[in-house]
Amino acid sequence: MSVTLTGCPGEFPRTDDRRATRGYRFGLINLTDVPGQPPPADHLPGFRWLATVDPETRAMSMRYAGHDSTVQEAIFVPPRENAPHGVGYVMQLVDRHAEAAG
């Protein structure tokens, strides 16, 4: 069965790897566009937002990388192996194009 979680174009979906073949309550995805949000004035191509999605409720929250910035694939890192699902850190490289830094 296929379920659409969001109407936003995106790529590189991730979740807590410890739950990859089982049910999970959050996922991460990079977005190129968010309906209802104006396109960035710098017109850079690429992923501009990181979103978290709850597949059960379809609730989604987003973070914008900022002007002149794009994001790379995020990872989820639990603080310890036996940490509860969803407890941990999201790490992601943000490219700051105006500074030529990543």
Image (spheres, rainbow, N blue to C red):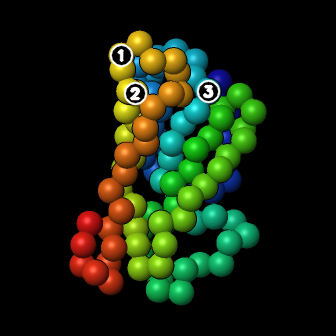
Name the kind of residue labelled 3 in the image.
Answer: Arg
Q: Are marks 2 and 3 in contact (CB under 8 Å)?
A: no
Label 2 sits on a secondary structure element that is loop
| Comes first in the chain, label 2 or label 3 | 3
Residue denoted by label 2:
78
Residue denoted by label 3:
25
Is residue 75 toward the left or the right of residue 7 in the image? Answer: left
Residue lying at 43% horizontally and 42% vertically, measured from the top left: 90
Residue 77 x %, y %: 37, 32
Label 1 sits on a secondary structure element that is loop
The CA span between labels 1 and 2 is 7 Å
| Comes first in the chain, label 3 or label 1 | 3
The CA span between labels 3 and 1 is 18 Å
Residue 24 visible to an observer of this rendering: yes
Q: Which of the image's four quarters has the N terminus?
A: top right
Nearer to us of marks 3 and 1 is 1
Name the kind of residue labelled 2 in the image.
Answer: Pro
Residue lying at 71% horizontally and 28% vertically, measured from the top left: 56
Residue 64 x %, y %: 54, 65
Residue denoted by label 1:
81
Residue 20 x %, y %: 45, 22
